[in-house]
Amino acid sequence: MDQTVQTVDVGYAGAVGSVEQRNRVLRNTYWLLALSMVPTVLGAWVGITTGAMATLGVGISTIVFLGGAFAFIFAIEKTKNSAAGVPVLLAFTFFMGLMLSRLLSFVLGFSNGAGLIMTAFAGTGLVFLGMAFLSTVIKRDLSAMGKFLFIGAVMVLVAMIAIIFLQSSALMITLSVLVIGIFSAFIVYDLQRVKNGMETNYITATLGVYISLYNVFSALLSILGFAGGNRN
């Protein structure tokens, strides 16, 4: 087997020129995205049942989250063209599920917590379906939008770190709405890149869409928790 075929097998599709090749990258992205939900749920379950994240303070958990996430993203980019790419990505999604357990535990403290989580999950699913549809019908090239989305994401990250220590529910809800808007746009942007053949590695494509969905779900759950949580 030559080197080209080997790299296709582990995620690299080369220069995507034909519709068939582009569809294969997109199909693999969707399959890997679906698979990534399994370790995410497992990580969240481990975090909730063990209370591992609850023992950490806000500052420490934020440092662990940011340090771990960026380390995994770096590792994924380094291994995306090798057989280790998919396992590293799945390990990342387990870690993200573990980090999500802190928010899930908070929401489960409400009497309607389970319902709020299911509502956030359904809402995230609708956002994904809507953005995936838009990525197929929008004919305009959205490449130029990437720079502005990246700047917006960085600004949101800085603001969220500040709000964690400010403990302002009103600001958190406002920022969560912005997060939903920015990362919904990221989903359209990332999927269109695959559709147009600008992203040829389904591991990288999956990583981008996964991070967007993770942020949309977290933001929706935060809004529902602060606005609709019932302590009775």
Image: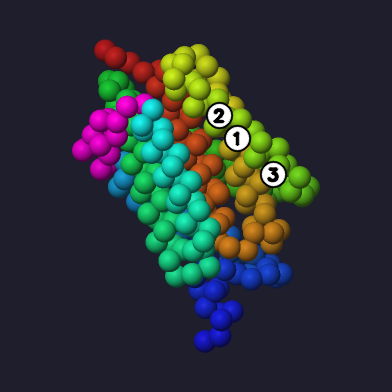
Label located before the other in sequence (1 or 3): 3
> Tag 2: residue type?
Val
**Residue 159: percent from the left, percent from the top?**
55, 25
Whether residue 34 appears in this view of the structure is no
Q: Which mark is residue 225?
A: none
Whether residue 13 appears in this view of the structure is yes
Q: Can you identify the residue that label 3 sits on? A: 146
Q: Secondary structure at mark 3?
A: helix
Badge 1 density bin: few <14, some 14–19, many ≥20, Cα 10 Å: few
Q: Residue 52 magenta-drawn?
A: yes
Q: Secondary structure at mark 1?
A: helix
Q: Can you identify the residue that label 1 sits on? A: 154
Q: Can you identify the residue that label 2 sits on? A: 158
Badge 2 density bin: few <14, some 14–19, many ≥20, Cα 10 Å: few
**Residue 37: percent from the left, percent from the top?**
40, 49
> Tag 1: residue type?
Val
The correct choice, above or below, for 217 with respect to 191 in the image is: above
**Residue 198: percent from the left, percent from the top?**
69, 59
Task: Find out whether the residues at labels 1 and 2 contact each other: C-beta distance under 8 Å.
Answer: yes
Q: Quadrant of residue 54?
A: top left
Q: Which residues are magenta?
A: 45-58
The residue that appears at 66% across and 46% down in the rendered structure is 189
Q: Secondary structure at mark 2?
A: helix
Residue that sits furthest to the left in the current view: 50
The residue that appears at 55% across and 49% down in the rendered structure is 208
Mark in the foreground, 3 or 2: 2
> Tag 3: residue type?
Gly
Q: Quadrant of the C terminus?
A: top left
Image label count = 3
The residue that appears at 57% across and 68% down in the rendered structure is 12
